[in-house]
Image (cartoon, helix red, strand yellow):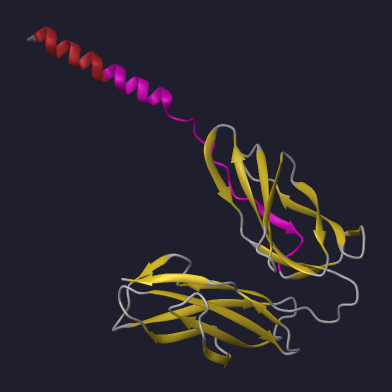
């Protein structure tokens, strides 16, 4: 009996030591990078012009702690096409379509752990020839998000988004398309708030919605189609 207890105690001790040995060392989790350029909501005019339709744009960010490599993730806000590029430096240059809005963020990674950190997401316009005004950026959908399952309050939900533009104060209004098909009808036209409260919904139904942002010059942008389910 004593021999059995002794073996059990030794096993527990060894397991405890083994567990400690396999723990990752402290201070290896990468911190999120701080973006520097192209700046948030700016018209980027510093790129090197390659042709009438393309320019080379340099992206820069501050070094983040405990990081060995970075991945820049770039999205064309007109086509929703996403590309990524990895580097060990805190800068990289990409060839982009001119007169086009983009968003970007940085993923920080460490060879000591599989955990990564993501920076804030910034938007900018890559400047192009002959442009006097720039359309607003596509609205950021805040709630409900894509694929979210949401619980209504008294049979209603709230829709919320955020608009932005390279020229602050130029957003005039929004059109909100909302319905149960993937081609939802225009339900709320030329509203000036960035939300619609008390939208009636039915439990067990999937809904689709999108937001069109319009500025004072009449230029528009499309958030893209979002869907969610009411439980």
Where residue 27 appears, x then y in whole percent? 53, 37
Where residue 38 appears, x then y in whole percent? 77, 61
Q: Residue furthest left?
A: 1
Could you tell me which residue is drawn at 75 percent across and 41 percent down? 89
Where residue 15 appears, x then y in whole percent? 30, 21
Is 150 placed above or below 47 here?
A: below
Q: Is residue 3 left or right of residue 36?
A: left
Quadrant containing the N terminus is: top left
Q: Is residue 134 left or right of residue 68?
A: right
Is 157 placed above or below 231 here?
A: below
- How many numbered marks are there? 0
Could you tell me which residue is drawn at 65 percent across and 63 percent down? 80
Q: Which residues are magenta?
A: 13-40
Is 105 placed above or below 153 here?
A: above
Where residue 115 appears, x then y in whole percent? 52, 41
Q: Is residue 53 left or right of residue 107?
A: right
Could you tell me which residue is drawn at 36 percent across and 25 percent down? 19
Q: Quadrant of residue 59?
A: bottom right
Q: Is residue 43 magenta?
A: no
Q: Nearer the viewer, residue 221 or 206?
A: 206
Could you tell me which residue is drawn at 67 percent across and 63 percent down? 122
Quadrant containing the C terminus is: bottom left
Q: Is residue 35 magenta?
A: yes
Q: Is residue 51 left or right of residue 67?
A: right
């Amino acid at each position: 009996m004593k021999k059995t207890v002794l073996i059990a105690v030794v096993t527990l001790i060894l397991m405890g030591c083994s567990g400690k040995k396999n723990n990752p060392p402290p201070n290896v989790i990468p911190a999120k990078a701080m973006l520097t350029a192209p700046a948030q909501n700016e018209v980027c005019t510093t790129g090197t012009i390659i042709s009438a339709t393309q320019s080379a744009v340099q992206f820069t960010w501050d070094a983040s702690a405990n990081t060995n490599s970075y991945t820049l993730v770039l999205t064309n806000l007109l086509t929703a096409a996403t590309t990524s590029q990895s580097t060990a430096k805190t800068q990289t240059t990409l060839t982009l379509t001119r007169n086009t809005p983009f968003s970007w963020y940085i993923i920080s990674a460490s060879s000591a752990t599989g955990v990564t950190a993501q920076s804030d997401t910034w938007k900018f316009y890559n400047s192009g020839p002959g442009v006097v005004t720039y359309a607003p950026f596509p609205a950021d959908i805040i709630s409900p998000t894509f694929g979210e399952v949401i619980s209504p309050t008294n049979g209603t939900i709230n829709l919320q988004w955020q608009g932005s533009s390279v020229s602050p104060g130029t957003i005039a209004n929004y059109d909100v398309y909302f319905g149960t098909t993937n081609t939802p009808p225009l339900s709320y036209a030329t509203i000036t708030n960035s939300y619609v409260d008390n939208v009636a919904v039915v439990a067990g139904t999937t809904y689709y919605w999108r937001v069109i942002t319009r500025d004072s010059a009449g230029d528009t942008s499309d958030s893209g189609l979002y869907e969610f389910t009411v439980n």
